[in-house]
Image (cartoon, grey):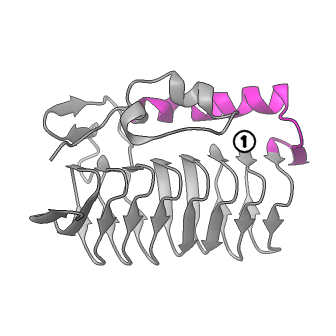
């Protein structure tokens, strides 16, 4: 099983305002320290068809925001995205088009590509979620080790990131079951599904079904 971790292996970015970000870094966790400055530069430059909702919050066309959602800048919300009641965007959040940020979900310092769904009681911090990635109800991206030390990505080789906070990296089409905990630095491969109620750490291969950390099968 090939446990891929490079940005180009995990994501196909066709969102024009996100392509420079994804093309600039070999590994997706290298994106995380640069999200805020990238958003501020985009807001200053402007994106065609996007308007300022308030200071440092830029939104596309046909964005639906429920009254009880809270959005702090700098943030960019892609066209067609829905932000449901009680959602809390704490800043340094950027999404592609047609995403769902759901009831009581909390996001900070993260990038979502297109058609990402974090629809029910999710936490997404210091993470990158690929096209059509989906997180089941109550699943979270844990972004801080209990000892506070820098996160190591543990795959076929270990990658010393030097970053104290990394959540999860979900490749295009990744589907996380309800109630899962993705421990700091977890990478889920393309089109891989994770059964509910798993606690995962490490790098998981593409085109697989993760029944448990010890029981991974390739899709047939």
- SS for callout 1: loop
| Magenta segment | 29-57
**Closer-to-camera residue (140/117):** 117
- Residue at the far left: name it: 214
Residue at image x 41%, y 49%?
A: 171
Q: Position of residue 220 (x, y in %)?
A: 22, 65
Q: Is residue 86 one of those drawn in magenta?
A: no
Q: Nearer the viewer, residue 17 or 111?
A: 17
The residue depicted at 49 percent of the width and 35 percent of the height is 32
With respect to residue 97, does 180 lie above or below?
A: below
Residue 128 visible? The answer is yes
Q: Is residue 73 in view from this perspective?
A: no
Q: Residues within 10 Å of mark 1 (few under 14, many from 20)?
A: many
Q: Which residue is mark 1?
A: 74
Report the front residue among 29 and 194.
Answer: 194
Residue at the far front in the pictured view: 220
Residue 13: x and y, percent?
A: 56, 38
Q: Quadrant of residue 195?
A: bottom left
Q: Residue at x 23, y 38 (%)?
A: 152
Q: Position of residue 99 (x, y in %)?
A: 65, 60
Q: Is residue 55 above or below residue 117?
A: above
Query: Could you say which quadrant of the image residue 17 lies in?
Result: top right
Horizontally, is 60 left or right of 207 in the view? right
């Amino acid at each position: 099983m090939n446990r891929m971790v490079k940005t180009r292996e995990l994501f196909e970015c066709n969102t024009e305002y996100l392509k420079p970000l994804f093309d600039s870094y070999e590994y997706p966790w290298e994106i995380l320290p640069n999200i805020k400055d990238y958003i501020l530069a985009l807001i200053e430059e402007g994106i065609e068809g996007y308007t300022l909702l308030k200071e440092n919050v830029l939104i596309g066309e046909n964005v639906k925001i429920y009254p009880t959602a809270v959005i702090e800048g700098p943030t960019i919300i892609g066209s067609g995205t829905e932000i449901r009641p009680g959602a809390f965007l704490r800043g340094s959040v950027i999404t592609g088009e047609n995403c769902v940020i759901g009831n009581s979900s909390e996001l900070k310092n993260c990038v979502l590509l297109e058609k990402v769904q974090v629809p029910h009681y999710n936490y997404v911090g210091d993470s990158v979620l690929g096209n059509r990635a989906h997180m089941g109800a109550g699943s979270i991206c844990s972004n801080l080790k209990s000892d506070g030390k820098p996160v190591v990505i543990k795959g076929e080789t270990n990658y010393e990131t030097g970053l104290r906070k990394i959540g999860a990296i979900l490749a295009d089409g990744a589907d996380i079951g309800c109630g899962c905990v993705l421990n700091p630095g977890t990478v889920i491969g393309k089109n891989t599904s994770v059964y509910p109620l798993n606690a995962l750490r490490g790098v998981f291969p593409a085109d697989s079904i993760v029944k448990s950390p010890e029981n991974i099968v390739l899709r047939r």
